[in-house]
Image (cartoon, helix red, strand yellow):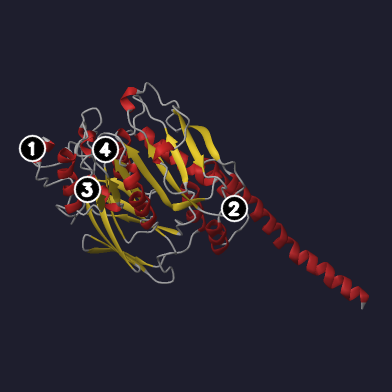
Amino acid sequence: MARFACFFIALAAVLLAPAGRAQSGAEAAFEKFFAADSPDAAAHSVADIEKAGVTFDEAWRRLKAGRNYAAQQSGVVMLKNRTEDGVDHSYAVNIPAGYDPARRYQVRFQLHGGVGGRPGNSPRGTGEIGTLAGAEQIYVLPYAGGDTPWWTNDQILNLNAIVDTLKRTYNVDENRVVVSGVSDGATGAYYIAMRDTTPFASFLPLNGFIMVLTSDEIDDGFMFPNNLRNKPLFVVNGGRDRLYPTHNVEPFTKHLISSGVEIEYHPQPEGEHNTKWWPEVKDSFEKFATEHPRNPQPEKLTWEAGDKIHNRAHWLVIDEFGAAAGEARTLPDANLHLTEAAVAGRADGSMFPRFKAAGRVDLVREDNTVDATTSGVTAFTLLLSPDVFDFDQPVKVVANGTQVFNARVERNVKTLLKWEAADNDRTMLYGAEVQIKLTR
């Protein structure tokens, strides 16, 4: 009897050992994934998770839970990064007193003005948010200069790198990251909203003017006001502003509102080119930020792009440009039909000129059906999240009135890990990709 007992104990040990080793391998692989210091490093660790034989459901659970955060020192932290284009950037992070790693924190990027008067992007001042402080949150103060203004792809890379670093170090609420700015910083907020909507919940330009971006030194032909329709804006301008007074700015603000851009507008009739009005506006500003969290999987999307650098909005990626059969000839466009054409300087009533070919996709999702309307796009990819799609039922895609896809899709661990390595976002996980190619 004793021999049989020993046999069964030994057999159990043999059977259980591989499971135990696999679990240890999975633990180590996910620890390496979460400890990665960049999207590239995270992507390189994906193979270890796949080798551990982790199921989709297990990977989904772990990615939803995210990493464990450690306690961090409060106050101002001065940091640097080097973006993938080889430019060094400095930025300051204000961590609130009593920072609790178990709590998710709202983040505000505050972009400064006076970019042209700065020879470089080195830090200035103490790095504190100062008089523009509002609700308790993490404040980020990047720096820009004449060589690295807010309205460049380099600064898009910079803000993306900062968001990623923050999320790897601090417990950030991914759906409450906003971009605000004053003067040139406000103009930069408009630029970022038109180029890179995905990481941000809202944009809050103060004393800025979107039409500054029409400058020949800035406008590259890929300014798309229509992209502003994806996220709400909180806009402040002053009546006595020597640079951007309300009587110059308001026609464009009202035009954007009439074109479907959600703007909460707070004109300050006596306001000059400063923020003396902040004490009166602060509560409305913070209320707006609180009441407009990001929807990581929006039911509607519209995105226009001219290249593959800024070709993504949440679960839409534009892959190829060109004319497709049956595409929309015209789409409602916030860039057009501006009544203040004389102010814009263009007889056709457009805000920004179109001297380069571009493409656009409008999406509407209802249950498992996606209705796409395209112009100038021949291929795009849809990223599907189990949070909003039923993977046990077929997914149907209709493009320009024609059904182009109707099938069930499989949950794919590789896809899940690929996009989470890039996005580093617990609330925006994708289990499958559907690639749509349209006939020319």
Report, in whole angstroms, how far the alpha carbon at label 4 lies from the one at label 1. Answer: 20 Å
Would residue 122 be found to the left or right of residue 113 on screen? right
Q: Which residue is mark 4?
A: 208
- Amino acid type of the residue that numbered disc 2 sits on in the rendered structure: Ile
Confirm or deny contact between disc 3 and disc 1 (CB under 8 A): no
Tag 2, which secondary structure? helix
Q: Nearer the viewer, mark 3 or mark 4?
A: 4
- Circle number at residue 376: 3
- Circle number at residue 342: 1
- Amino acid type of the residue that numbered disc 4 sits on in the rendered structure: Gly
Confirm or deny contact between disc 2 and disc 3 (CB under 8 A): no
Tag 3, which secondary structure? loop
Residue drawn at 33 percent across, 42 percent down: 278
- Circle number at residue 49: 2
Q: Nearer the viewer, mark 4 or mark 2?
A: 4
Q: Say which of 232 and 361 sits in front.
A: 232
Q: Say which of 198 and 323 sits in front.
A: 198
Q: Nearer the viewer, mark 3 or mark 1?
A: 1
Report, in whole angstroms, how far the alpha carbon at label 2 lies from the one at label 1. Answer: 59 Å
Report, in whole angstroms, how far the alpha carbon at label 2 lies from the one at label 3. Answer: 39 Å
Identify the mark nearer the N-term, 2 or 3: 2
Write down the quadrant of residue 215 in the picture: top left
Q: Say which of 438 and 201 sits in front.
A: 201
Q: Say which of 357 and 96 sits in front.
A: 96
How far from the left and from the top, in percent, is residue 112? 36, 33
Confirm or deny contact between disc 4 and disc 1 (CB under 8 A): no
Identify the mark nearer the N-term, 3 or 1: 1
How far from the left and from the top, in percent, is residue 220? 24, 33
- Amino acid type of the residue that numbered disc 3 sits on in the rendered structure: Gly
